[in-house]
Image (cartoon, grey):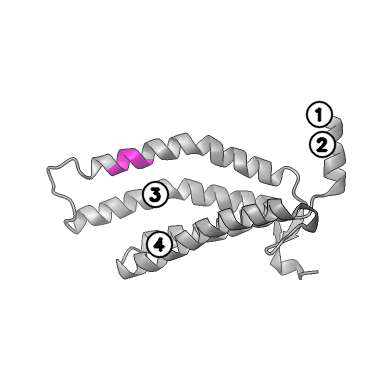
Amino acid sequence: MPTASLMLRRPVVSLLVAAWWLASPIVEAVFYSTEQSRGAYPPQADSIVIPIFKFAIVWVLLTPFVAGLIWLALRLAPARFPWLAFDPGRRLWCVFWTLALGTFAFSELWFCVASIGRNHPEDVAGSLLGIFAALALRAAICARRDPLALIAHRHAV
């Protein structure tokens, strides 16, 4: 059994994922502000507006999906679970989410390294937050289910 300091709790995971999601527009705004001040976009062109609006529309459209994913992942998760949680009774489920969120975390890590080279600390911070959020969400999804929560959920339906 992992030590208590390495265990995750449901509120911590939900706050971590929510912080990453809510920080995304701020990171995006700082990025475009930095790029504009570096002269990457012509001052009188709309080339900067198009990606900003694209990000805003996609972010607003995906917000209910992210909120639903957080709720689904945490509604039956145990109160405490390890970072490397894996439920042998749900192998395919755990492998799928490990691959999906692991791929996302790896792409964030790749972007983080590239952002260091491009001197964008806001992207580095956003990527690191995204990596921890993805790994914590994966742990919540793959944790062994609390049998009492399953019984209570079945009786409530």
Q: Crowding near pointer 1: few (<14 within 10 Å), some, many (20+)?
A: few
Amino acid type for the residue under numbered disc 4:
Phe
- On the image, numbered disc 1 is attached to which residue? 157
Crowd rating for badge 3 (residues with CA inside 10 Å; few <14, some 14–19, many 20+) = few
Q: Answer with mark 1 or mark 3, whichever residue precedes in sequence.
A: 3
How far, Cα to Cα, is label 2 from label 3?
A: 37 Å
In the picture of the structure, the residue carrying the numbered disc 4 is 111
Residue lying at 60% horizontally and 59% vertically, measured from the top left: 135
**Majority secondary structure of magenta residues:** helix
For residue 38, what is the image quadrant?
Answer: bottom left
Instruction: Specify the segment rendered in magenta.
Output: 51-55
Q: Give percent across and percent down for residue 103.
A: 52, 58
Callout 3: SS: helix
Residue 13 drawn at (x, y percent): 63, 53
Q: Are marks 1 and 2 in contact (CB under 8 Å)?
A: yes
Three-letter amino acid code at the position of disc 3 = Ile
Q: Residues within 10 Å of mark 2 (few under 14, many from 20)?
A: few
Q: Nearer the viewer, mark 2 or mark 3?
A: 2
The residue sitting at 61% across, 42% down in the picture is 69
Residue 104 is one of the magenta-drawn residues: no
Q: Quarter holding the C terminus?
A: top right
Q: Identify the residue at horizontal 43%, vertical 65% (top origin).
A: 110
Residue 143: name its quadrant: bottom right
Against 83, is 51 above or below? Answer: above
Quarter residue 155 falls in: top right
Mark closest to the chain's N terminus, 4 or 3:
3
Foreground residue, 154 or 95?
95
Residue 83 screen position, x and y as percent: 67, 63
Which residue is under mark 3? 26
Query: Residue 153's mark?
Result: 2
